[in-house]
Image (cartoon, rainbow, N blue to C red):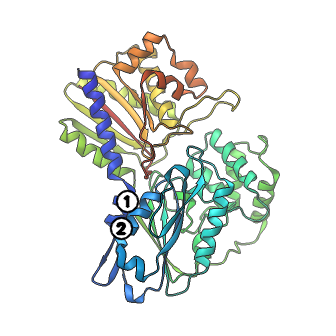
Amino acid sequence: MLSSKLRDDALAIWRAGVDAVRSDRLVCEHVRVTDGDLVIGAQTLPLDDVGRIVVVGAGKAGAGMAAGLEAALGDAVLRSKRVTGWINVPADCVRPLRCIQLHAARPAGVNEPTEAGVAGTQRILQLVQELGPADVCLCLLSGGGSALFPAPIAGITLADKQAVTQHLSGAGANIRELNTVRKRLSRIKGGGLARACRAGQLIALIISDVLGDPLDVIASGPTVENPATPQDALAVLERFRAREAGVPSAVFQCLESAAASPRDSSPRTACRVTNVLVGNNATAVDAAGREAERRGYRTEREAVQTLEGDVGRVARLLAERAVQLRAAGGRRCLISGGEPTVTLAPASARGLGGRNQQLVLEALQYLIVESGAAADGLVLLSGGTDGEDGPTDAAGAVLSTEVVQAMQDRQLSPAPFLARNDAYRFFEPLGGLIKTGPTHTNVCDLRVVVTA
């Protein structure tokens, strides 16, 4: 059956993109030991000159990155350099490794800072402060690191940071705006880890979950000096009416006090810092494109480099492109990467979903309900490459003939589900959810349209 084949192809293309950015694979591609040297990216370190190696970090890809690093270093280096480490990861990513401790810094599906995250971050700061000039610190960073790396500055509590995160996320702030505020309220973000580190060298391996790959934004830039000022953070809070929404006054007091200071009094970084980007959204888009071509599709690729804006606008554009591809005839595929924003309904009315599920439901509403088009001959899907979409166990959702038919059989209307951000409960009984479990990577979202 054509519709079933299209759906299977779309999912296989999406999975090929995700597999290409598997975090252990990316680390192994950039780290190797050869002829007495440790080679990381373009940098070569003679192992005889290295004292200890300590590994720290945070992110949804942290477990895979750590496993890949242990494999790349090999038994001899793990022993001779007394490799140890600590990585903050979501609870469902924890597993035993040889030398590196994986710490459950937040529950699965709850992308907010927690007390466990604070404790883990304090342990990381302690580890890097104990290093010496002959030592090397390797930092593994990936998407989700901001919530997994909480270390509030003096005068700010964890509850204050949670309130800021919840308000800005719910109000539709993008990742740059959110991290502009979070960096100014943290001891580890915005270059704080680099300032605390006493190793001779700090090398960060980074998987980007931010469009355009700005290193100061990914995981809130713990190894990159912060270009954002306290005034910038206050401007974000004002733009999203945080004071009126009840964000704690301590947040404003700390930022206003810092803004009134004549200059930033933060100490400078003591060690040499190198940041190595090992994977991003374009990597996944390219790999998915190759798989689509292998399956016989005429393929277009779009790895977005700038912020996309509202999810409804992105969904309509994607739905329109799907109709155009179908009208052009033949086997065609569009692969795009990005990360739209969603303005959430009030918490009292809010359902269950994530931006990928919301995008597919918006596309369904526009394509099938508003435009009156048929779903025959096309499939549209969107999924988070981390396997996590909002506070759910789904990576995303798929629009197909089968899903539309099931919707019509049940006489469901997408509109009320969209209004309360309840896409999960819309797609779940229709068999429209994509579920993968943790993928141990995170490079924004990957979307696939196939037509025939």
Asked whether, in this view, residue 139 is left or right of residue 171, the answer is left
Q: Is residue 251 visible?
A: yes
Q: Three-letter amino acid code at disc 2?
A: Ala
Look at the image and tell me in which quarter the N terminus lies. top left
Lower sequence index among marks 1 and 2 = 1
Q: Is residue 310 above or below residue 142?
A: above
**Image location (x, y in percent) of residue 409:** 43, 10
Q: Is residue 40 visible?
A: no
Q: Mark 1 vs mark 2: give the one in front.
A: 2
Look at the image and tell me in which quarter the C terminus lies. top left
**Residue under the point 49% across and 87% down:** 134
Q: Quadrant of residue 252?
A: bottom right
**Image location (x, y in percent) of residue 262:** 75, 72
Mark-to-mark CA distance, 1 and 2: 9 Å
Q: Is residue 193 above or below residue 419?
A: below
Residue of label 1: 24
Q: Three-letter amino acid code at disc 1?
A: Asp
For the residue pair 192 and 120, the one nearer the viewer reads as 120
Q: Is residue 152 above or below residue 414?
A: below
Q: Are marks 1 and 2 in contact (CB under 8 Å)?
A: yes
Query: Label 2 crowding class (10 Å Cα cut-off): few <14, some 14-19, many 20+?
Result: some
Q: Is residue 400 above or below residue 120?
A: above
**Image location (x, y in percent) of residue 374:** 34, 15
Q: Secondary structure at mark 1?
A: helix
**Residue under the point 78% across and 45% down:** 243
Tag of residue 71: 2
**Image location (x, y in percent) of residue 17:** 33, 46
Q: Quadrant of residue 233?
A: bottom right
Q: Quadrant of residue 387?
A: top left
Q: Secondary structure at mark 2?
A: helix
